[in-house]
Image (cartoon, rainbow, N blue to C red):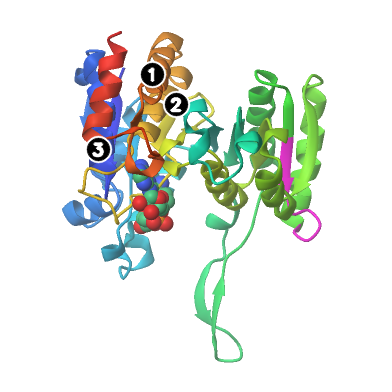
Amino acid sequence: MKIAVLPGDGIGPEIIKQAVKILDAFSLTDSIEYASIGGAGYDEFKDPLPEQTLNLALNADAVLLGAVGDWKFDKLPRDMRPERGLLRIRQALNLFANLRPAIMFPELVHTSSLKPEVVSGLDIMIVRELTGDIYFGQPRGISINDNGEQEGINTMRYSESEIRRIAHVAFKTADKRAKKLCSVDKANVLEATELWRKIVTETAIDYPNVELSHMYVDNAAMQLVRDPKQFDVVVTGNIFGDILSDQASMLTGSIGMLPSASLDENNKGMYEPSHGSAPDIAGKDQANPLATILSLAMMFKYTFDDQDKFKLIDCAVKKVLLDGYRTADIYSEGSKLVGCEEMGDAVVERLKG
Ligand code: NAD
């Protein structure tokens, strides 16, 4: 087992430290090797994805990533910005399938901005395509147009094979859950997503047990806050998935609770919290490490097929919440306010029984 650990920027190192405590509790610290990415990569090697980091990730079985980004890098040329390192590593590892569960823990029902009856029992899996769409499509850039004014261009692009492979992941995921798949697109105005709808519909023939529905993205955004429990698995493209998964995260109280897995064809994966580097709270011991810890749990489930360790971590997180431990983002009166370190320690304690 070889795990590349990339803490990144902002709160990245703090939250990764808590996940590493868990690897330590499993006596797996010998399996890990650290490297820099994002702004940390730029600071060290003038590259947001240094060559040695990419090689380490390519040779590892799985990657555990904190987060990248800091406002201080916003003036760098686009290719040198931290976020570019993230896009490049996803593409280099061919991590086309991003799984983002949005689960409402019963203890946190009152931290959601929605009514308890709307979110209680919520369990959605968003399957987001991660290596295509407008984030990668060419042509792109800012240039001077024929009228002599600046023009920004991005291109939404999806090939049939890209859509088909993510559709298979989504149908298989739904097949193991409540067998309902909702494909989200904007087929009424965007040809790229008209093709998306056609290919997803064709793929459904291989999965007769899964009920497929389609929804336009604007309606999906509305339905997610009106009646989120109507969804089981949602599959969508890169940009719509980016936005809808953040929206879904807030249904559960805090983005600090939401893990993610990004997988290739062979279930090699990169595991990271759904949130960013939160520069506003970096270095203050205020970050919630649970999304990162739950991402580590997903690593055991999807890449290492070790359901025992997945369940151990998942149960330890549930126990910590049941025992009233809360970081500031999920705090409510009467619970025990803790920092990032103490939250990590509390999870490790409960792992040991
Ligand atoms: P963000 O997710 O970093 O923060 C949004 C809000 O959520 C902030 O108020 C932050 O304090 C809070 N938050 C986030 N994670 C938290 C946690 N674990 N515990 C408690 N509170 C938490 O998004 P942003 O502010 O839009 O972006 C900040 C930087 O992160 C930018 O440079 C952006 O490009 C980058 N970013 C990186 C990733 C990634 O690494 N995958 C994803 C999104 C944004």
The mark that comes first in sequence, 1 or 2, is 2
Please say if the residues under marks 1 and 2 sit with CB atoms less than 8 Å apart.
no
Q: Which residues are magenta?
A: 182-190
Name the secondary structure under disc 2. loop
Q: Residue under label 2, please give it.
A: 268
Question: Residue 67 placed where, x, y %?
Answer: 34, 45
Determine the CA span between mark 1 and mark 2: 29 Å
Disc 3: which residue: 339
Determine crowd level at label 3: few under 14, some 14-19, many 20+ residues with C-alpha closer than 10 A: some
Label ID, residue 319: 1
Where the N terminus falls, by quadrant?
Answer: top left
Q: Is residue 34 left or right of residue 326?
A: left
Give the amino acid type for the residue marked by disc 1 in the picture. Answer: Lys
* Residue 271, position as x, y percentages in the image: 40, 32
Which is more toward the observer, 311 or 158? Answer: 311
Of badges 1 and 2, the one in the foreground is 1
Measured Cα–Cα span from mark 2 to mark 3: 32 Å
Describe residue 338's horizontal placement relative to residue 178 as left or right.
left
